[in-house]
Image (cartoon, rainbow, N blue to C red):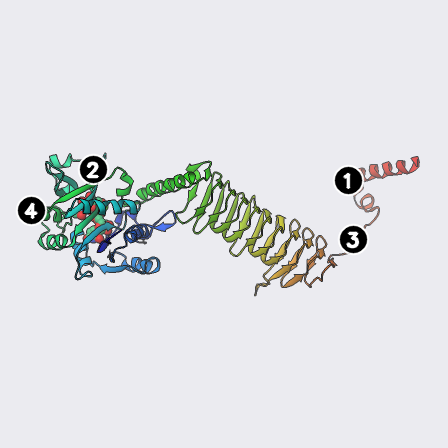
């Protein structure tokens, strides 16, 4: 945007009482990000010279959050919420020597897009307006300020619902609360307004009438997409706006070549990245910095948080976080990937397998019923069914390594710290506490001992004894034939 606007002011001092929350309304999230972060991102997209957020209620929480997500933002403190006009006055105290255009918007209107804000500024400039108001026509204008137009394209004033007469209440064009002001019109307008109204507040909206009285042109910029003007006041609206944002995110990805079988049960955070020809099956939730490579299939019933999935991988009925899954690998059904898990290309983490800080090399497989904790598993190694990597001795956690192309027999326990070198075998049912050298077979279990005739002596008269007797008779007959 050239030239940039002088300032954007984001109003965010209100109480948000109807959220009934110990957390600031602005920190409640949709699609994985705080409500206020959307306003900040949209405001930042204008590249304003200065960006001020007016904070008040639960300002400690808001300021801490802003310092984290948007250190470039300046905050202005409104101690008492005396109205939107007062809030902007407070912001102006941080904006000395202000000339040019000032955009005012709210911290709780998350679906307002950067494009709409830019269009608002462009419309303001092209029409040489003193104030441009972002407006919408809504089916139910209750509670909103109404746009009172003159006979032409100018706006005369904005009347708040509680101050409106019957004719004004019938107006369906509403003030969204987002505006562009010429700085001098804003400053002189705010100096002229008073709190003579139903709520005893300083209304920012009264600046419009002040501007018109001094002959300045005020115009409305009407948009069709009502969601962009919707604020969040309670948790019902939070859920509705979250669902709408999710729907928009899914539409974006479908248009980019992602197949989504059931959009109603698929949730994708704003920060997720998906390649073309990804397929998302029902009940999938992709969160945080998750990314999915081309041709991969995720779901059904899978939640991935900060997981990187390679091309053509399949992830079925899995819960995972902070993990990296290679190309053509497969995970699940019913797998649990905990932080630090990496699976190499063509690797496999199968059914009822939990992995934590486990690194599987290319083609390594743990197909069934395992716990892999703090383990490094070489390429092509095969971890048998039911193998447990015991990483914790009750005091410390240690690492286990399994070399390339090892074969760890089913139901073995590898007690960390222990190293199984490349090309070694571990016999099924072993408990391994000492290192195994390349090419060795490690066996660690009681020698098998068979006691002939035990069932006949100790379990006489049972079906088991009868089965044994019959089998023995059969075997003897076979002997006779020979
Ligand atoms: C305001 C507008 C109304 C518009 C509506 C759109 C005024 C007088 N009215 O009404 O025309 O249709 O928004 O939602 O401006 N805030 C502060 N400090 C304050 C008061 C408010 O920071 O002292 C912030 C709130 O946190 C909120 C925003 O300003 O983000 C709007 O405040 P709210 O009380 O919701 O305004 P409305 O009365 O709904
Ligand atoms: Ca409101």
Q: Is 475 displayed left or right of 27 in the figure?
A: right
Q: Nearer the viewer, residue 456 or 265?
A: 265
User: Residue at (89%, 38%) from the top-left corner?
Assistant: 476
Count of numbered tags: 4
Q: Which residue is mark 4?
A: 213
Residue in view at x 38 percent, y 39 percent: 247
Q: Which mark is residue 448?
A: 3
Give the alpha-carbon distance from disc 3 to disc 1, as whole Å: 21 Å
Camera-nearest label, 3 or 1 = 3
The answer to whether 82 appears left or right of 433 in the picture is left
For marks 2 and 4 on the same chain, the one whose residue lies earlier in the sequence: 2
Q: Residues within 10 Å of mark 1 (few under 14, many from 20)?
A: few
Q: Nearer the viewer, mark 2 or mark 4?
A: 4
Residue bearing the label numbered 1: 464
Give the residue drawn at x 9%, y 46%: 212
Mark toward the start of the polypeptide (2 vs 3):
2
Determine the secondary structure under disc 1: helix
**Label 3: which secondary element:** loop
Q: CA distance from mark 4 to mark 1?
A: 104 Å
| Quarter of the image that includes the C terminus | top right
* Furthest-bottom residue in this view: 395
């Amino acid at each position: 945007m050239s030239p940039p606007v002088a300032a954007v002011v984001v109003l965010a001092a209100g109480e948000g009482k109807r959220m009934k929350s110990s957390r600031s309304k602005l920190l409640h999230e949709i699609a994985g990000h705080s409500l206020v972060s959307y306003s900040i991102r949209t405001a930042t997209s204008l590249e304003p010279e200065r960006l001020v957020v007016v904070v008040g209620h639960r300002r400690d929480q808001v300021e801490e959050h802003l310092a984290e997500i948007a250190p470039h933002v300046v905050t202005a403190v409104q101690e008492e919420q005396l109205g939107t006009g007062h809030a902007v006055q407070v912001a102006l105290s941080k904006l000395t020597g202000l000339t040019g255009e000032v955009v005012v918007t709210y911290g709780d209107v998350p679906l307002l897009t950067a494009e709409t804000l830019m269009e608002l500024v462009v419309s303001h400039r092209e029409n040489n307006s003193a104030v441009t108001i972002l407006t919408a026509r809504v089916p139910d204008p209750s509670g909103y300020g109404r746009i009172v137009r003159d006979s032409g394209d100018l706006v005369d004033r904005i009347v708040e619902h509680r101050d409106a007469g019957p004719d004004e209440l019938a107006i369906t064009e509403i003030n969204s609360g987002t505006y562009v002001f010429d700085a001098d019109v804003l400053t002189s307008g705010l100096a002229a307004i008073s709190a003579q109204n139903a709520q005893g507040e300083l209304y920012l909206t009264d600046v419009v009438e002040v501007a018109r009285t001094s002959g300045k042109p005020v115009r409305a910029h009407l948009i069709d997409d009502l969601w962009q003007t919707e604020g969040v006041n309670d948790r019902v609206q939070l859920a509705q706006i979250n669902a709408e944002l999710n729907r928009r995110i899914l539409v974006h990805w479908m248009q980019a070549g992602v197949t989504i079988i059931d959009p109603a049960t698929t949730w994708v955070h704003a920060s997720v990245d998906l390649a073309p020809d990804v397929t998302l099956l029902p009940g999938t939730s992709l969160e945080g910095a998750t990314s999915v490579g081309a041709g991969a299939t995720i779901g059904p019933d899978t939640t991935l948080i900060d997981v990187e999935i390679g091309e053509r991988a399949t992830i079925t009925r899995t819960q995972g976080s902070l993990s990296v899954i290679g190309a053509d690998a497969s995970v699940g059904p019913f797998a649990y990937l905990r932080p630090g898990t990496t699976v190499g290309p063509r690797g496999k983490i199968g059914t009822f397998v939990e992995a934590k800080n486990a690194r599987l090399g290319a083609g390594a497989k743990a197909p069934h019923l395992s716990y892999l904790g703090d383990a490094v598993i070489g390429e092509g190694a095969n971890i048998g069914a039911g193998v447990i990597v015991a990483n914790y001795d009750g005091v410390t956690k240690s690492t286990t390594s399994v070399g390339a192309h090892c074969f760890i027999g089913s139901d073995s326990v590898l007690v960390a710290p222990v190293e199984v070198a490349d090309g070694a075998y571990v016999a099924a049912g072993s408990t391994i506490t000492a290192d195994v050298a390349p090419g060795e077979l490690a066996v660690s279990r009681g020698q098998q001992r068979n006691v002939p005739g035990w069932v006949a002596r100790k379990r006489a008269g049972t079906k088991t004894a009868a089965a044994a007797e019959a089998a023995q008779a059969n075997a003897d007959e076979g002997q006779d034939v020979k």
